[in-house]
Amino acid sequence: MTRSLALLSVAFLIVVFGCATARDQRKVIQLQDTGEKYLAAGETAEALKYLTEAAEKSPDNPTIYYDLALAYDKRDLMDKAFECLNNALKLKPAYPEAQNTIGTLYARRGQYKQAQESFQKALDDPFYKTPQLAAYNLGSLFEKKGEIEKALTYYQQAVKFDPRYGEAWFKIGQILEQQHRDDEARHAYGNAVASKPNMAEAQLRFGITSYLAGDTDSALNSLSQVEKLAPNTSMADEARTYLQKLSASGGKTGEHGRTPSYSQPKQVEEIYSTEGKRQKTNGSLSSSPSPQPVSPAQKNDPGEVQSIPVQPEVPVTPQVSAPEEAAPVPGRTPEGAQSQSRKYIVQVGSFVDNEKAEEVRNNLAAKGYSAVVKEVKQRGLGKVFVIQLQPVNSISKATTLTTQLSGEMEGEPVIIEVPGK
């Protein structure tokens, strides 16, 4: 009997201890969750309160130390942030988010060798979910050291990991423009604008390089955006200067008299044909939203801030602004139905020079496309020449054509809805 009672007592203690441990673990999770929510909301004092208590109850949890480091860094307590990140890395050496973040702190201290080592460790980790951040930071580091070619290589690696990384595309554009690789720079700025429409610096550079290339449509669209995104700034002043040049020239040529390269503007409000018929386009072409930094509040993966920039004059964190409404594709009918009274024209180019437009049309004809060059008047620019394929009867056929052309030619085709005959 005594032996049985002893065994029952031991079993009871095990159950009680297990229940207590489970309660403690739930408490730690609750404290960390609350701290992360305050951290995401920018209330760092409250975040530190809850995260510190969580660390006291669970001193072997690396993600809590990582969260604490982010909170301390937001409070400009860099030494505390270093201490927490080192604790996290001692507990979990393969922690690329912590490696990337401690690298940014080293860089801000001017300890570039340590920063490079940390960024490289993060980049080399095959399980790192956001390697583009480490690649971008390495690019920023080498750019600051004056090693421009290495910087370019890492920025290019960043956009390979994430083709929608607007900040990296912008840095690529800056370097290429400095190297007088103008067409490549404009392409990079165009990708930056497509990825981050609210990035005023990218809109300005894409607008100016488009103006110099003679692409007046893209220049007008981007330069107009700068005034909206960054009013009362030197960027807005520079944009207005080029807008005035566009207005004075009537949209005929770029500053250096270059003929425009083929590039369909991404934002077109409306076009007026020479017959006086108004034709609506699909407006601002929609693009997938650019990737946001992983929120610290995401459970099981506390995430990381998008890199603390090595060069603070080019902030990495996206600006907060009101989202633009995506314009619907005109003439879209319910699935399975087709409009019997509308036709759809795919437009693949807009040029100020008729000879250039004819050259592109001939190239299309050689590939089996039936296209015509039309002279139209665009509001604010005057006469331009557009290339349009023969009308089709359904939006699905038009969409298929745009997909085919996007793979064969530079630029973004648009679909125009016109009355059927």
Image: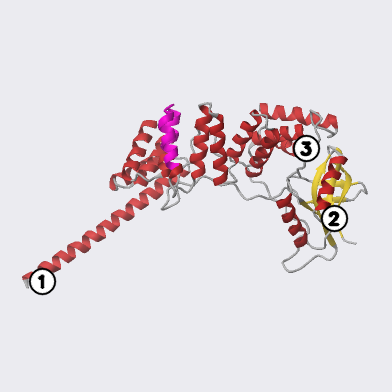
In the rendered image, the vertical position of residue 234 relative to residue 167, given as above or below: above
| Residue type beneath disc 1 | Ser
Element carrying mark 2: loop
Magenta stretch, main secondary structure class: helix
Give residue 153's position: percent from left, percent from top. 55, 37
Crowd class of label 2 (few under 14; some 14 to 19; many from 20; radius 10 Å): some
Give residue 296's position: percent from left, percent from top. 45, 46
On screen, residue 307 versus residue 185, left or right, reads: left
Please give the range of residues in magenta: 101-122
Most extreme residue toward the right, as rendered? 275
Which residue is identified by label 1?
Answer: 4
Which residue is identified by label 3?
Answer: 215
Which mark is nearer the camera, 3 or 2? 2
Q: Is residue 342 visible?
A: yes
Q: Earlier in the sequence, mark 3 or mark 2?
A: 3
| Residue type beneath disc 2 | Ser
